Image (spheres, coloured by chain):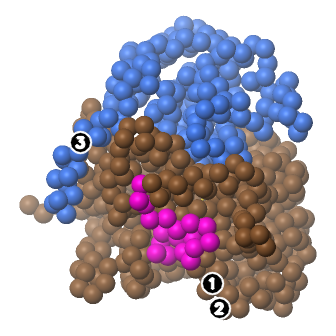
Chain colours: A brown, B blue
């Protein structure tokens, strides 16, 4: 009997069931790759120690440091300029834990260190068809390779370290189909902001998103990572793009990717992963990619996004009282007036970086705008990893940024989460290529406009929110 | 973990929508390497002024909020970052249940592992709860009901396995460790 058509998610799910779910118990789901960083792991290692447990599969576990790490180089005394002793102790704790348990760690100052979701794919560790988890909600990024990748809490980090498995119920599926081609000046960041605005920040709850359609197929691997990265901002734990030639070409030759005959076999397996014709999704949404414009957020969650030429919405126009009051609160925090244009809004800081937009292509886009121009705001350019930094420097992008007056930093999460001292002062406005504009996310009292690297660079040049299409 | 059967408490109402985990516990408090004592930093940026003094208008700082174990929050509570520090902070503060019309997936999963009940109720029951801050509610995990102001016992859904773990004070790791043989068979077959 021919089996029913299955989605990409269903194929991966079925292939990782140690035990199927029943009404009484969730599935026991096997994890192929577990990524570990310093912030969400210490209490999980403590759990292993308390119970006298080893890490079950060191060969499926990879660690780096990114959140609490400084983005300024070592001082003359050889010491890293940590924000405080607590951050330094947290980073040291991961080094100790990795050494004690025998885990592969790419620590501060080593050649591959970087933001965990930039680092994993770069190593070739993230591969199609895998289950990938990390104690970090932007693990969704790895879905760009046709993997099922999602964030977990620290208790679950402990579960995976100890058993390589998680207890899970199968999520529902949501197909987001993006038709047409994205216009010039519009990229994956604009697309995902438009999708989140349509779905709402809770609209994807309980679902895994599969991104489909012509515009998605045309995206580079790095752009697909940007797209999948922010799936969690619509409430979806994971986002995925079926693997294709773009995926295979990007992976081939990376150090953790298979080689020789094993590579050919892997590619043959990966070609069978895309959803079957006629596979059913629980929900579907279609977006016209060709009609999109550069997007920017105006409020305090990533669903508060509008086309850059649009006006800030008027809460008075909202019928639902809860939505109206949340919008009023957002505008009050942001210091914006209902109906005002977002273009021309003055900006104090521009941040280009993060696991959303800290890869080489993102830096190239920012550099294309900054080349031969000067910035009018404080501008931080933070590469996503040491390898991104090295590749950017090999192309001379660092020289472009420095000549424009921007700061060229060491890799890390930096101002995306503001744990390491890179932060806004109260009241400051930032255009940021990161993924969250929550209150205080970039520093207590700081106010964030999320946008693409192109929009961020254009806004740095003028000192106000600017439509990059006038500068290209 | 201590078993949970019944939670009876007055409520604190924080009706904002989309309360993200960055608000529940801001990132600068995540530099810890243990879980203890995070309760004092719960909702820190809403709770304390620039000088660190409690802001008298914030609901958690009002005298009537002291000792409340049930938080009633707006739609889509716990969205954003996967930090388990959020339920750790809420639990350490003294909360034992959060009620909303929608609760984010990762937060819900984390809460269930830490003795904090994430309870989703329908819009009408939620409206009744929001309209009566400080009302006493009774959550019966065994019966899967919550009594709302006015006395009605409203049923709520919870994953059967999580319910079992909470009622009996057992954790998921023990169950997973018990699967060692099946895991080895799975690994061997690949
Ligand atoms: S760059 Fe930002 S979103 Fe990405 S892992 Fe770091 S803190 Fe999280």
Asked whether A324 or A241 is in front, the reply is A241
Q: Is B83 on the left-hand or right-hand side of A349?
A: left
- At x 80% / y 68%, what residue is drawn? A350
Determine if residue B162 is in view: yes
Task: Return the residue at label 3.
Answer: B179
Determine if residue A285 is in view: no
Task: Return the residue at label 2.
Answer: A394
- At x 41% / y 29%, what residue is drawn? B158
Task: Kindly indicate whether the residues beneath marks 3 and 1 are on one polypeptide chain.
Answer: no
Q: Position of residue B138 (x, y in %)?
A: 52, 11
Q: Are marks 1 and 2 in contact (CB under 8 Å)?
A: yes
Q: Is A376 on the left-hand or right-hand side of A289?
A: right
Subunit of mark 2?
A
- Pointer 1 local density, CA inside 10 Å: few below 14, some 14–19, many at least 20: some
Name the residue at the left extreme.
Answer: A1
Q: Which range of residues does the magenta coloring cover?
A: A101-123
Measure the alpha-carbon separation of dots 1 and 2: 6 Å
Q: Is A213 on the left-hand or right-hand side of A232?
A: left
* Secondary element at tag 1: helix
- At x 59% / y 12%, what residue is drawn? B9
Asked whether B158 or A384 is in front, the reply is A384
Q: State whether residue A254 is above or below residue A276.
A: below
* Secondary element at tag 2: helix
Image disc number at residue A390: 1
Q: Are marks 3 and 2 in contact (CB under 8 Å)?
A: no
């Amino acid at each position: 009997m021919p089996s029913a058509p299955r989605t990409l998610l269903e194929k991966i799910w079925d292939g990782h069931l140690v035990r199927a779910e029943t009404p009484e118990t969730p599935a026991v789901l096997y994890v192929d790759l577990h990524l570990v960083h310093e912030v969400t792991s210490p209490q999980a290692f403590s759990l292993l120690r308390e119970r006298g447990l080893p890490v079950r599969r060191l060969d499926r576990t990879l660690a780096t440091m990114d959140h609490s790490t400084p983005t300024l180089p070592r001082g003359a005394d050889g010491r890293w300029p940590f924000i405080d002793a607590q951050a330094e102790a947290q980073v040291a704790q991961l080094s100790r834990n990795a050494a004690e348990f025998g885990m592969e760690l790419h620590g501060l100052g080593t050649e591959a260190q970087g933001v965990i979701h930039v680092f994993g794919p770069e190593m070739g560790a993230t591969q199609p068809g895998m289950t990938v988890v990390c104690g970090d909600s932007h693990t969704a990024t790895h879905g760009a390779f046709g993997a099922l990748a999602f964030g977990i809490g620290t208790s679950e980090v402990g579960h995976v370290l100890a058993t390589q498995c998680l207890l899970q119920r199968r999520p529902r599926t949501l197909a987001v189909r993006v038709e047409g081609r994205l216009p010039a000046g519009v990229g994956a960041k604009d697309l995902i902001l438009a999708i989140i605005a349509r779905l709402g920040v809770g609209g994807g709850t309980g679902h895994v998103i599969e991104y489909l359609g012509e515009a998605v197929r045309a995206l580079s691997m790095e752009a697909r990572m940007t797209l999948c990265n922010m799936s969690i901002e619509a409430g979806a734990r994971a986002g995925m793009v079926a693997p294709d030639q773009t995926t295979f070409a990007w992976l081939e030759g990376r150090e953790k990717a298979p080689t020789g005959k094993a590579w050919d076999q892997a590619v043959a397996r990966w070609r069978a992963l895309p959803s079957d014709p006629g596979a059913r999704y629980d929900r579907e949404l279609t977006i016209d990619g060709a009609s999109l414009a550069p997007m920017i957020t105006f409020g305090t969650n990533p669903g508060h996004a509008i086309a850059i030429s649009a006006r800030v919405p008027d809460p008075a126009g909202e019928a639902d009282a809860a939505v109206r009051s949340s919008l009023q609160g957002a505008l009050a925090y942001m210091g914006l007036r209902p109906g005002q244009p977002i273009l021309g809004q003055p900006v104090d800081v521009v941040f280009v970086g993060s696991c959303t937009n800290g890869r080489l292509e993102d830096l190239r886009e920012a550099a294309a705008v900054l080349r031969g121009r000067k910035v009018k705001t404080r501008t931080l350019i933070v590469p996503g990893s040491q390898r991104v930094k090295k590749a950017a420097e090999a192309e001379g992008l660092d020289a472009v940024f420095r000549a424009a007056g921007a700061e060229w930093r060491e890799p890390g999460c930096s101002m995306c989460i503001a744990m390491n001292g890179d932060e806004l002062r109260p009241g400051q406005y930032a255009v940021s290529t990161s993924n969250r504009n929550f209150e205080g996310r970039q520093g207590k009292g700081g106010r964030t406009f999320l946008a693409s690297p192109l929009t961020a660079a254009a806004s740095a040049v003028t000192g106000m929110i600017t439509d990059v299409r006038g500068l290209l | 973990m201590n078993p949970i059967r019944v939670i009876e408490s007055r409520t604190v109402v924080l009706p904002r929508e989309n309360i993200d985990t960055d608000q529940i516990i801001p990132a600068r408090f995540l530099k810890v390497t243990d879980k203890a004592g995070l309760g004092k930093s719960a909702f820190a940026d809403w709770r304390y002024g620039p000088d660190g003094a409690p802001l008298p208008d914030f609901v958690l700082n009002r005298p009537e909020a002291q000792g409340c174990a049930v938080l009633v929050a707006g739609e889509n509570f716990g969205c954003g970052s996967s930090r388990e520090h959020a339920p750790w902070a809420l639990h350490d503060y003294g909360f034992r249940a959060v009620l909303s019309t929608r609760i984010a997936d990762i937060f819900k999963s984390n809460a269930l592992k830490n003795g904090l009940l994430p309870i989703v109720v329908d819009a009408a029951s939620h409206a009744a709860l929001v309209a009566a801050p400080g009302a006493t509610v009774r959550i019966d995990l065994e019966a899967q009901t919550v009594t709302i102001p006015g006395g009605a016992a409203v049923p709520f859904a919870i994953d059967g396995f999580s319910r079992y773990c909470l009622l009996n004070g057992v954790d998921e790791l023990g169950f997973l460790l018990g699967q060692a043989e099946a895991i080895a068979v799975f690994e061997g077959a690949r």
